[in-house]
Amino acid sequence: QVQVVESGGGLVQAGGSLRLSCAASGNIFTLNAMEWYRQAPGKQREWVATITSGSSTNYADSVKGRFTISRDNAKNTVHLQMNNLKPEDTAVYYCNAKLTDGLRYGDYWGQGTQVTVSS
């Protein structure tokens, strides 16, 4: 079985920083791209950032220049460094891991971590 667990959320003032982490564990054969999504109250889940197995990155326009995604392949972890946070960044942040568990290729989601930015 595979588990994906996020951590690092919390409450921060506008202009502050937070660092989210996500760890994938279990029967992982190949870990491919890892992504962050977020969902604000009353809104659909939106994509935030992607990092490939080769560490190529891509960001949503709304976070470009403020957020940085990175990964540690030895630990099957991905991080999201969030700087200059804005109230509109308030959301539950979800990690998505695209991997093969020895039987199939699929998307595995974490349970989410709350980020709240006060004005």
Image: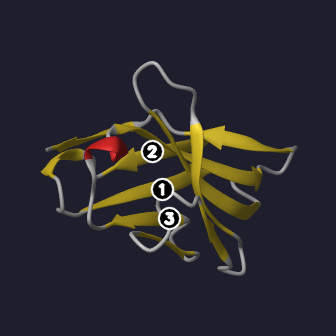
Q: Quadrant of the C terminus?
A: top left
Could you say where residue 46 lies in the image, as x and y percent from the top left?
58, 40
Q: Residue at x 87, y 44 (%)?
A: 103
Which of the two residues, 82 or 111, is positioned nearer the viewer here?
Answer: 82
Image height of 93 relative to 100, above or below: above
Of the residues under marks 3 and 2, which one precedes in the sequence? Answer: 2
Of the residues under marks 1 and 2, which one precedes in the sequence? Answer: 2
Left or right of residue 78: residue 10: left
Could you say where residue 74 lies in the image, as x and y percent from the top left?
55, 77
Which residue in the rendered view is the most extreme toward the top?
A: 42
- Residue wearing tag 1: 23
- Residue wearing tag 3: 77
Callout 1 amino acid: Ala
Q: Residue at x 51, y 39 (%)?
A: 110
Q: Are marks 1 and 2 in contact (CB under 8 Å)?
A: yes
Residue 102 visible in this rendered orientation of the protein: yes
- Residue wearing tag 2: 5
Callout 3 amino acid: Thr
Q: Residue at x 69, y 55 (%)?
A: 28
Q: Quadrant of the N terminus?
A: top right
Callout 2 amino acid: Val
Identify the coloring. secondary structure
Q: Are marks 3 and 1 in contact (CB under 8 Å)?
A: yes
Q: Secondary structure at mark 2?
A: strand
Q: Residues within 10 Å of mark 2 (few under 14, many from 20)?
A: some
Quadrant in the picture for residue 116: top left
Q: CA distance from mark 1 to mark 2?
A: 5 Å
Quadrant in the picture for residue 118: top left
Q: Residue at x 22, y 64 (%)?
A: 17
Residue 27 visible in this rendered orientation of the protein: no
Could you say where residue 100 lies in the image, as x and y percent from the top left?
80, 53
